[in-house]
Image (cartoon, grey):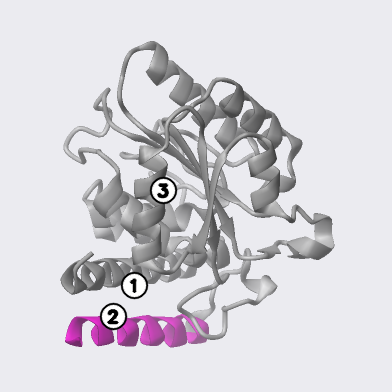
Amino acid sequence: MTKEERKSLQAAAARIRMRVIEGTHAAKSGHPGGSLSCSDFLAYLYLREMNVNPAEPRWADRDRFVLSKGHCAPALYGALVERGFFPEEEILTLRRIGSRLQGHPNMNLTPGVDMSTGSLGQGVSTACGMALGARKLGKSLRVYTLLGDGEIEEGQVWEAAMMAAHYGLDNLCMVVDNNNLQIDGAISDVMSPYPITEKFAAFGFFVQEIDGHDFDQIEAALTAARAEKGRPSVIVLKTVKGKGVSFMENQVGWHGTAPNDEQYEQAMSELRAALAEVEAE
């Protein structure tokens, strides 16, 4: 990856984070913490990895993305704006009655959303079905699904993992946003899923663990996942909940709390400064 390509992705991720803050502030509700932790990955996924067409959101041969941790929709919406699926100004309608941008993704309303999600554990099962269906139809598309690390406490996740390995779904890439915090506290305290990598390896996955805020590592991991044949892949992203906003980082209270006016101004000031720094390099 060139320096300019990396800068472009860093700038895109900063804009996605700004949309997370703008949307949740306007709605006075939502989930900024986990949305901020996965913004870098979604920037790379939509701008460099996935084969999609904003002019034709339902194109049959597009790659698919399922946000299994559906409460982090603000980050997905921010990425979809960045890729050109709908206008920037719609971010301010987050969670409002009549808006296309509800608190969890709705495939019937929102361009670019491939699956309605919200009940944790179910999105990954759908992604497995998409990958198996694509194979049976002879399509070369890939399916990506993003899970929370608290979400993988759900038994349905492991049933889906067993299915993916059983059918050798090498067109499927699961991604775990391992920021170590869920709504009630540290995942190791609530119901520890550790060691995450060893569990997926035992289920027959090609496993990678990376810094989820490093674009070179994200690129290398997705490239390796694409090259792996005969088994599904999982990428465990080591991330910081609330990444990019100083007072939200590693704070469990920001799992599902919207910033007030003063917090909004501070968060946006920090994110604007980060964007300006990237653009000035």
User: Which structural element holds mark 3?
Assistant: loop
Question: Is residue 143 among what the camera can see?
Answer: yes
Q: Which of disc 1 and disc 3 is earlier in sequence?
A: 1
Asked if residue 279 lies in the magenta stretch, the reply is yes
From the top left corner, tell me how far across and down residue 214 is, in percent.
Answer: 40, 69
Residue that appears at 56% across and 70% down: 258
Q: Specify the amino acid type for callout 3.
A: Leu
| C-alpha distance separating marks 3 and 1 | 20 Å
From the top left corner, tell me how far across and down residue 212 is, in percent.
Answer: 47, 64
User: Which structural element holds mark 1?
Assistant: helix
From the top left corner, tell me how far across and down residue 42 is, in percent.
Answer: 39, 55
Question: Mark 1 = which residue?
Answer: 14
Q: Specify the amino acid type for callout 2.
A: Leu
Residues 74 and 265: in front is 74
Magenta stretch secondary structure, dominant: helix
Question: Is residue 120 among what the camera can see?
Answer: no
User: Which structural element holds mark 2?
Assistant: helix
From the top left corner, tell me how far across and down residue 269 is, in percent.
Answer: 37, 87
Whether residue 20 sits left or right of residue 7 in the image: it is right
First to last magenta residue range: 262-281
Residue that appears at 32% across and 14% down: 138
Q: Specify the amino acid type for callout 1.
A: Ala
- Dot 3 crowding, Cα within 10 Å, few <14, some 14–19, many 20+: many
Question: Mark 3 = which residue?
Answer: 101
| C-alpha distance separating marks 2 and 1 | 6 Å
The reply to whether discs 2 and 1 touch (Cβ–Cβ < 8 Å) is: yes
Which part of the image, by quadrant, shows the N terminus? bottom left
Question: Mark 2 = which residue?
Answer: 275
Residue that appears at 62% across and 76% down: 250
